[in-house]
Structures are given as structure tokens and as C-alpha cells.
Image (spheres, helix red, strand yellow):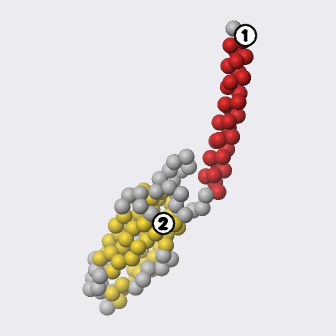
């Protein structure tokens, strides 16, 4: 009986140390990863009645992007929409704008979590639509 107990302790102690080491590596890795960012920094000018298309990329994402959306309180101008395919690191703003003006557009997104929690990114764009 004493021999089985000793064997169990000798086998468990090294594994526990290994688990602690692995956990600390995950915690450190999660804390030093860069925050994802949305690019471009500025959206190109659009024109009323002219097809518009520009790509919004999520850079520094360590995992796939779960969503990329436009905030309802700072939407795209009428005629434009943001499309994003889940897990892709980019989305596309496209369409044909119908009204001239200057618009504040808030694009935001998040990444999936794995060993680390998912991360969020957002950018407030100023989009000008000319006649």
C-alpha cells in the first residue's frame, strides 16, 4: 500500500508542475498579444449614384473574426452595407450611396476566444459622400 501511494505521489507531482508551467505560458501569451485593429484608417470618399466598394481588414487578430458589424447609432449612409463572412479577417463596405453628406460610421468586431478570451476592435470612420 505504501508503495502505491509513493508511486502515485511521484507521478502526480511532476504532472502538476507541468500543468502550472503550461498555464503560466497561456496567461503570459494572452497578456502580451497585440490588440486587433481595423484598417484602413480612413474610408475613401463615395459619390451619390456611383458604385462604392472598400475592404475593411482586421489586423493583429490572433484568431478568426467572429463578427464585423456597423453600430446602429452610427450607421452607413443609405445604399451602403457592410458584409462579412464569419471567420474571415475582412469585410466589405459596398453599394450605391443615395444621399450626399458626411457620416460618422462606427465599425466594430470581435475575434473568437480559444485559450485566451476573444478580443474586440472598433473604429469610428468619417465617410464623405459627394454629389
Which mark identifies residue 58? 2
Percent x, y of residue 53:
35, 77
Which mark identifies residue 15? none
Q: Which residue is tagged 1?
A: 2
Above or below — where is 41 with respect to 85? below
Within 10 Å of the Cα at label 2, are there few (<14), some (14-19), or many (20+) other Cα atoms? many
Q: Which quarter of the picture shows residue 56?
A: bottom left
Q: Pick the residue in front: 28 or 14.
A: 14
Q: Is residue 105 left or right of residue 30?
A: left
**Residue located 50% across and 77% down the image:** 41
Percent x, y of residue 110:
47, 59
Q: Is residue 49 visible?
A: yes
- Which quarter shows the N terminus? top right
Q: Is residue 71 visible?
A: no
Q: Pick the residue in front: 93 or 128.
A: 93
Q: Which quarter of the picture shows residue 21?
A: top right
Percent x, y of residue 8:
68, 19
Above or below — where is 32 with respect to 59? above
**Residue located 39% across and 67% down the image:** 91
Q: Which quarter of the picture shows residue 85?
A: bottom left
**Residue located 61% across and 52% down the image:** 30
**Mark 2–mark 1 distance (CA, rounded to whole Å):** 58 Å
- Which quarter shows the C terminus? bottom left
**Residue located 64% across and 47% down the image:** 27
Q: Earlier along the polypeptide chain: callout 2 or callout 1?
A: 1
Amino acid at each position: 500500500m505504501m508503495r502505491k501511494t509513493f508511486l502515485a505521489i511521484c507521478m502526480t507531482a511532476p504532472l502538476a508542475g507541468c500543468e502550472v508551467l503550461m498555464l503560466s505560458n497561456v496567461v503570459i501569451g494572452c497578456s502580451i498579444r497585440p490588440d486587433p485593429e481595423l484598417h484602413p484608417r480612413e474610408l475613401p470618399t463615395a459619390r451619390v449614384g456611383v458604385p462604392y466598394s472598400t475592404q475593411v481588414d482586421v489586423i493583429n487578430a490572433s484568431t478568426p473574426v467572429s463578427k464585423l458589424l456597423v453600430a446602429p447609432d452610427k450607421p452607413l449612409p443609405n445604399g451602403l452595407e457592410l458584409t462579412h463572412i464569419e471567420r474571415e479577417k475582412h469585410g466589405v463596405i459596398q453599394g450605391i450611396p443615395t444621399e450626399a453628406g458626411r457620416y460618422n460610421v462606427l465599425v466594430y468586431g470581435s475575434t473568437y476566444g480559444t485559450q485566451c478570451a476573444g478580443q474586440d476592435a472598433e473604429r469610428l470612420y468619417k465617410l464623405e459622400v459627394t454629389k
